[in-house]
Amino acid sequence: MLGDLIGDEQGQTTGIRVVSVDGGHPHVEASFQATGTLLGVAVTDLGTYDSVMEADGTLFGDGQGCIMTQDGDIITWHGTGVGHMNGSGGFSYRGSIFFESASPKFSRLNGTAGVFEYEEDKDGKNTAKVWEWK
């Protein structure tokens, strides 16, 4: 069951590289930086994801990152999703995300699954929302 919205952010792609094109399937790595909120706390998110494009244009992505607060709290994440090119010349992804943190403020995220929506435009500007999956 879809639960509460636990995070949202806005950011920018900061780097892209082609990892391989074996078998005619482009494998691309992209990094981003974003700011927003997680559990109502202001955060900065740094992440990298790898995507492979299938012949039909479907994208399969896998990513990881580090979320930081101004107070020095650290939350790591790992996400997996499926996507496609969108009408703006960018990308849309939907998927699942898992968090880990030693911070008492974010301990409720340990063992919690989330679902996300990610949108990116042709200029690399992106937005993401994460809901708790109960």
Image (cartoon, helix red, strand yellow):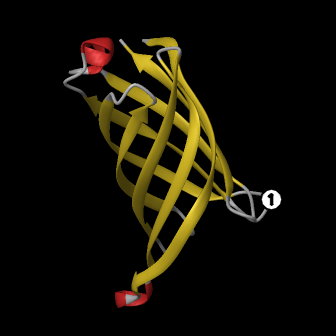
Q: Is residue 98 above or below residue 3?
A: below
Q: Residue most toward the right?
A: 88
Residue 46 as seen in the image, left or right of residue 57? left
Q: Is residue 100 above or below residue 23?
A: above
**Residue 70 at x, y percent in the picture:** 46, 29
Judge by depth and name the residue closer to the eye, 45 or 54: 45
> Looking at numbered disc 1 in the image, what kind of residue is underneath it?
Ser
Q: Where on the picture, by quarter, is residue 121?
A: bottom right
Residue 109 as seen in the image, left or right of residue 91? left
- Please report the residue visible at 44 percent of the width from the left and 40 percent of the height from the top: 95
Judge by depth and name the residue closer to the eye, 101 or 25: 101
**Residue 127 at x, y percent in the picture:** 65, 42
Q: Where on the picture, by quarter, is residue 86?
A: bottom right
**Residue 117 at x, y percent in the picture:** 57, 37
Judge by depth and name the residue closer to the eye, 125 or 134: 125
**Residue 1 at x, y percent in the picture:** 42, 12
Q: Is residue 30 above or below residue 87?
A: below
